[in-house]
Image: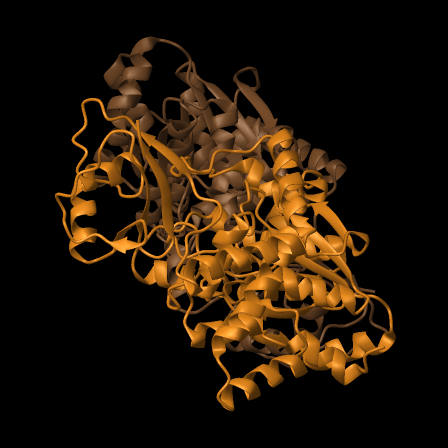
Chain colours: A orange, B brown
Amino acid sequence: MATLEEKLQIIRRGSDELLVEAELTERLRSGEPLRVKAGFDPTAPDLHLGHTVLINKLRQLQELGNHVLFLIGDFTGMIGDPTGKNATRPPLTREEVALNARSYTDQVFKILDRDRTEVVFNSTWMDRLGAADMVKLAATHTVARMLERDDFSKRYTNNQPIAIHEFLYPLVQGYDSVALRADMELGGTDQKFNLLMGRELQKHYGQKPQVILTMPLLEGLDGVNKMSKSLGNYVGINEDPNEIFGKLMSVSDQLMWRYIDLLSFASLATIRGWKQQVAEGGNPRDIKVAFAQEIVERFHGRDAAQAALADFEARFRQGGTPANMPEVNVPAAGVALIIPHVLKQAGLVASTSEGLRLIAQGGVKLNGEKVSDKSLKLAPGEQVVLQVGKRKFARVTIT
Amino acid sequence: MATLEEKLQIIRRGSDELLVEAELTERLRSGEPLRVKAGFDPTAPDLHLGHTVLINKLRQLQELGNHVLFLIGDFTGMIGDPTGKNATRPPLTREEVALNARSYTDQVFKILDRDRTEVVFNSTWMDRLGAADMVKLAATHTVARMLERDDFSKRYTNNQPIAIHEFLYPLVQGYDSVALRADMELGGTDQKFNLLMGRELQKHYGQKPQVILTMPLLEGLDGVNKMSKSLGNYVGINEDPNEIFGKLMSVSDQLMWRYIDLLSFASLATIRGWKQQVAEGGNPRDIKVAFAQEIVERFHGRDAAQAALADFEARFRQGGTPANMPEVNVPAAGVALIIPHVLKQAGLVASTSEGLRLIAQGGVKLNGEKVSDKSLKLAPGEQVVLQVGKRKFARVTIT
């Protein structure tokens, strides 16, 4: 059993802000499992490591004996974008919500403990509220208070429209905490305002206010921007194990430590040991391998992690080619078989001009040899391994 | 049958703003009765002439063949003040709403035509709306648009709190127009913003937008402030006929014309005749008498109007005392029978100091004689008529 101070240390690890620590201490002292709430969009999820920062923290709280309320915000999801302006947010049906929720939990139970997780839907209580209840909920806060929220304040100042229902959503999120009698709520740093709404509304409804814990937003592989699918700087948890491994090996040493702090389940003592090791001249690459192994194993199992390491070493350390690579047939008929065209036909580059540029930069290899002749021609029946950049391979047969 | 231009003239008479006149013309041309909406608070009503400005206009619209939707805003009334800060606005029960509505209609049917009036309650449709519908309604407008409303804008600028539900109420009022498929809505000039919401929401819901007509706020007897019960400058329609008559006779000649424009049902031609008469040296007092007679008759019948005139003439023209005055017994035991105390006991002044002040100002009469001796004493068994100011009388017996 962890001591109170150890528990607090685990909870604080990697977090951004804990409010109010004295209240958390008091709740932990009671020995009762805390009801820990975290809210998720009901849209089709495709989780990446950025999402898992918060889920990891939930897992740690579960390991300390607490109960996780995994809240799917389907009430607003089933409304969609009520202004109708955002075509990418159509109203979800109840069936779609159920499907998405299943997909969500399939992913998060790679981290969370099923026995200590309760999946809840806020439509359960929100659908029972009438227009009059919504009016009463709206009456608990002022326009000025709502305009304190960073994004609202910026948009208002810049004369960008804020639809009135946007003021209702933080109240709905806060009311969820009331309905769930949450002891604690977790969210990204960008959620602080909404988490505070939960505290305020719980007080309003005569409950003890929840403790709030914000987690930082994880940087993407570029080390600069927030990890996001649309920026392409992400590591998806359902990606190919070799891909995950390779992506994690590609991050800078500095970003590696950040990832380890927020994503590894290694104890704080272990991590201190690693840092010591590197400080004394150890190769950070060894730490990176251990970390990448841990992450791949978490989502794809031990065997996949071993295979990914082997694959990676074959490719990059020993200069070899990966065991599994796409086999591509390029038909000889009607195609100029010079190398940029073949790269394009094999799907290794988007266009022949990209192929030409990469050849000029020295980024293309044929059977492990750098290609310098951009007019190099292949012959029908030939079979070669083509490589573009560090990780794109194809075994090409001219047919 | 009135011509189109005559109808427009009747509708415009005394009004502040008509939007959009071309739309009204088009609707009138169709020959279909218009559905004319006006909203009223569901609190216990005690109507004064200020309220009747709008009701008179509804009556005129009825006389032109249109249908009045007399809307009781009980949805918000049953919510009360959801912030709980305003103790004078407790939530009303359905029974209280029904009672108040009955009291309202008892009063307004002295003006409106029952057969062309439909009393409707917005709880009928609002109680069926869920929280999600309220979110969708809120999504139709922006925060910036709502802050354009005069009172919101002022309060926001002055850092006075605006609770978020206050942004929902204009939307509810606007949605009422949708639910009622109103062709036209009437309101005070202070309601223009809310009436426009009705237009906007009707367009949003695919309806033709209602025409809006705003009526000015009637000045009170002081000729300066808006008529209101709390300011004491009002003429209540259920007041004693003599009191109504006396109050109307007390207004300035200038205010008289304003009242006639907004309250009299005399034709525009008749009113032009009266103005002509005064311009040619006629006594405005004669016009005032005719007008006061009209108003008393409207609310209390012809006999009461005649009696009020007779009473008034007896009091003020012939210097006599009114036929009906309160009889008050003042017990001699334990009370100093000097005149300021007796005035207070008789309920003619609020305090002995007020009595002393009025005596000093020459505003107190005993049996028609001005009282100048503030130590004047009455004796047990004595019976006198006491008068304070122009219209307060009591027949006092010292017992």
In what quadrant of the picture does the N terminus of chain A appear? bottom right
Q: Which residue is pictured at 40% across the width and 23% down the height?
A: B206
In the image, farthest residue toward the bottom: A280
Residue B106, picture quadrant = top right
Total marks in image? 0
Query: Residue A263 location, x and y as percent?
Result: 58, 67
Q: Is residue B218 left or right of residue B364?
A: left
Q: Relative to the observer, which residue lies in front, B368 or A361? A: A361
Q: Relative to the observer, which residue lies in front, B265 or A226? A: A226
Q: Is residue A170 visible?
A: yes
Query: Vertically, is A4 above or below B162?
Result: below
Query: Residue B17 location, x and y as percent?
Result: 30, 37
Q: Relative to the observer, which residue lies in front, B271 or B372? A: B271
Q: Is residue A344 left or right of residue B246?
A: left
In what quadrant of the picture does the C terminus of chain A appear? top left
Q: Which residue is pictured at 21% across the width and 37% down the height?
A: A378
Query: Vertically, is A96 above or below A142?
Result: above
Q: Is residue B368 visible?
A: no
Q: Which residue is pictured at 61% across the width and 69% down the height?
A: A264
Residue A273, picture quadrant = bottom right
Q: Is residue A57 left or right of residue B255?
A: right
Query: Residue A233 location, x and y as percent?
Result: 40, 57
Query: Vertically, is A316 above or below B1?
Result: below
Q: Relative to the observer, which residue lies in front, A15 or B340? A: A15
Residue B42, picture quadrant = top right
Query: Residue A267 location, x and y as percent?
Result: 68, 77
